[in-house]
Image: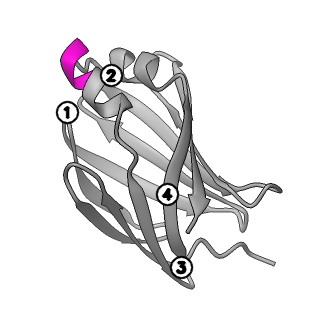
Amino acid sequence: MAVNFTGNWKHVESENFEEYLSAMGVNFAMRKIAAKTSPVNEIEQDGDSFKIKTISAKTKEVSFKIGEEFEDEMPMGKAKVKATWDGSKLHFDIDSPKGKLNTEREIRADGRMYLVMKAADGTTCTRIFAKQ
């Protein structure tokens, strides 16, 4: 049975986030500010259609359908994104101005959502969210 990501997810913990931002070319001051934020992800899932709203210092919303490429505005510029889904993990292959990036969202056994992000140089970080 496929996992349903629908809900509000509050950021509770990060691993290696500042190192990831550094690998992405984010300057020192912006890394420090970003590291102190605790965003909320509002996710609506309807079959293969998703809407993810990230509420932080800036609110960002993206809608997409699994398997269809879409454009996303990222801090480093426009990126082409393709989402795939294996029933438990939501994968994003991102072609960005900073190279090929990958992210995946997964709800693990502890009930929390893990967002694993991998930069073009291989630097990886994990952001953990708890359902509200």
Residue for badge 1: 76
Q: Which mark is residue 95?
A: none
Q: Is residue 102 left or right of residue 113?
A: left
Measuring from the top left, give residue 76's x and y in whole percent: 20, 33
Query: Contact (CB < 8 A) between labels 2 and 4?
Result: no
- Mark-to-mark CA distance, 4 and 3: 23 Å
Q: Which residues are magenta?
A: 27-31
Residue bearing the label numbered 4 = 10
CA separation in Å, label 3 and label 1 = 27 Å
Distance from Cα at disc 4 to Cα at disc 1:
24 Å
Q: CA gap, disc 2 to disc 4? A: 23 Å
Residue type pointed to by label 4: Lys
Q: Look at label 3 and name its amino acid.
A: Asp
Disc with the residue nearer the chain's start (2 vs 3):
2
Instruction: Inspect the image, locate mark 2, and give the three-letter code of the amino acid beneath it.
Output: Met
Q: Is residue 85 visible?
A: yes
Q: Which of the two labelled residues, at mark 2 and mark 4, occupies the earlier sequence position?
A: 4
Callout 4 secondary element:
strand
Answer with the quarter of the image where residue 69 lies: bottom left
Q: Are marks 1 and 2 in contact (CB under 8 Å)?
A: yes
Instruction: Give the residue number, with chain letter if any, for mark 3.
Output: 48
Label 2 residue SS: loop
Looking at the image, which is closer to me, 36 or 45?
A: 36
Q: CA distance from mark 1 to mark 2?
A: 8 Å
Picture coordinates of residue 80 (x, y %)?
A: 30, 49
Q: Secondary structure at mark 3?
A: loop
Above or below residue 109? Residue 46 is below
